[in-house]
Image (tube, rainbow, N blue to C red):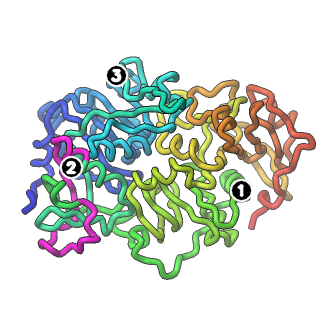
Amino acid sequence: MANFITAEQAALLIPSGAHVAALGSGGGVLEPDLIYKALESRFLATGSPCGLTVTAACGFGDKREGGISRFAHEGMTARFIGGHWAWSPQMQRLALENRIEAYNLPQGVLVSNYREMAARRAGTLTRTGLHTFVDPRMGGGKVNSRTKADLVHLVELGGEKWLHYRLPPVDVALIRGSLADEDGNISVCDEAANGELLAMAQAAKNNGGIVICQVKQRVRAGALPARGVAVPGIFVDAVVVNPAQWQSRGGEYGPAFTGRVHAVRPAIPPMPFGIRKIIARRAAMELYDGCIVNLGVGISDGIASVAAEAGILDKITMTVEQGLIGGIPSRGDLFGTSAYPAAILDAPAQFDFYSGGGLDIAFLGMAQADRQGNVNVSRFGSRLAGCGGFIDISQNAKKCVFCGTFTANGLEVAVQDGRLSILKEGRAAKFLQAVEQITFNGAYACRQGRPAVYITERAVFQLTPAGLELTELAPGISLERDVLPYMEFRPLIRRPLGEMPPQIFRQG
């Protein structure tokens, strides 16, 4: 018989100084929100638990008080190990102000580390992260000067360089499902992803820790079919029932996100015509029949809409790092879910596929790029966005397509008769002499023979061993007037210089 308790009772089970593994994904998916809220309330009322180490592989929250921000209190959290930080400005602030120890490590490495921990192995050995800011030679993923301990080590094996990642043992795993039977078996039948909940639960149990699971409904013993159990009851110490639990912040329940509905896909509304659509259209021209792709957050998540409008969506397979294969990846706040997926895997299995080179093309964001083809999406200016799964994906995909506007903050354009004109230039340059942080290393990609394309609304570049080469300009755009003055370096320029396809600048 499982131990069914309240969220307030669950909060009392978490001791000060514990390493808490927190589950969740964008838009409230898989987030045990009631437990997080009770834990925060206990700390604010009593000052306990304090000194926590919190690990969250995936970003989750609402950019206000929810999600990982429930842990973002000085004294409550002493150390945060995160993959994606953007959903919690509060946790970013604690790190940037040097008030907590803080690490930013690749999402795939973190979820794999749970599995290694569960098997009592010595951490994760991988090439993922080499020559980026998580490489110990370039900072080891440490966010601030307060962060001293090394979680990443450079090792040599068989004459090759590898990175060895090892997290501290998990004391408490906080997870979520849909149903729990009286024996504590957990089903995720109504959830939009599996994530890393099983690996987290095993990591905690096999290291002498506890597992607390939030579900929407309690059912009788034996009500769950064996194949419907995502986490066996032998791994679960306590269950909290929250009848008000929503599948995501987008709605209480959507059957299309569970993979239960495969009949007729509704038409995807076309993107409004504008900068984002122009970039997504040009990026979609890199697709080919049968390719397996991943779409990053931001402009690149519009490629699904463009592909659907062009009638080619069924000729490609889109994947999402939370474990989703096929279907239509969601955009915006629900990024990390897919409507009508063909299969839903655990996140560690998905990242095994990615790390082994299974992706044909990765379409990813681009906050900054430099003359060497390095890309930064993780930390720029006063913002600590985090790398998320970007490093795992970009370093192992057969080809990368980086998507972003040419300048940022205030860019305005107009299109007339298939020609682009710049009405107002963005205040921030994005093509810099050197990026602020290396999330993708261009020279390393070249040495590995992995091509990369950089697509903006007015120009297209490609990676070469000598650096970035300008290959295409938009119709109506002048190299000397609209491009070179807004770059901190002069790129290589292909001769003859090509033109971006005119049809992408026309409505309809």
**Percent position of residue 210, x then y:** 16, 46
Mark 3 surroundings within 10 Å by alpha-carbon count, few (fewer than 14), some (14 through 19), many (20 or more): few
> What residue is at 23 percent from the left and 46 percent from the top?
173
Residue at mark 1: 286
- Nearer-N-terminus badge (2/1): 2
The x and y percentages for residue 304 are: 60, 62
Q: In this rendering, which labeled residue sits more in front, label 2 or label 1?
A: 1
The answer to which quarter of the image holds residue 506 is bottom right
Up/down of 246 relative to 10, above or below: below
Is residue 440 one of those drawn in magenta? no
For residue 400, side relative to residue 256 (left or right): right
Label 2 secondary element:
helix
Mark 1 vs 3, N-terminal side: 3
Q: Nearer the viewer, residue 290 or 31?
A: 290
Q: Nearer the viewer, residue 486 or 323?
A: 323
Give the image location of residue 128, x and y in percent. Answer: 50, 38
Residue 361 in the image: above or below residue 271: above
Instruction: Name the residue carrying label 2.
Output: 35
Who comes first in sequence, dot 3 or dot 2?
2
Q: Which mark, residue 149?
A: 3
Q: Locate the N terminus and report the quarter of the image it occupies.
A: bottom left
**At label 2, which amino acid type do we have?**
Ile
Res. 354 visible in picture: yes
Separation of residues labelled 2 and 1 (CA atoms)? 44 Å
Query: Which residues fall within the magenta stretch?
Result: 203-231
Q: Position of residue 281 (x, y in %)?
A: 71, 58
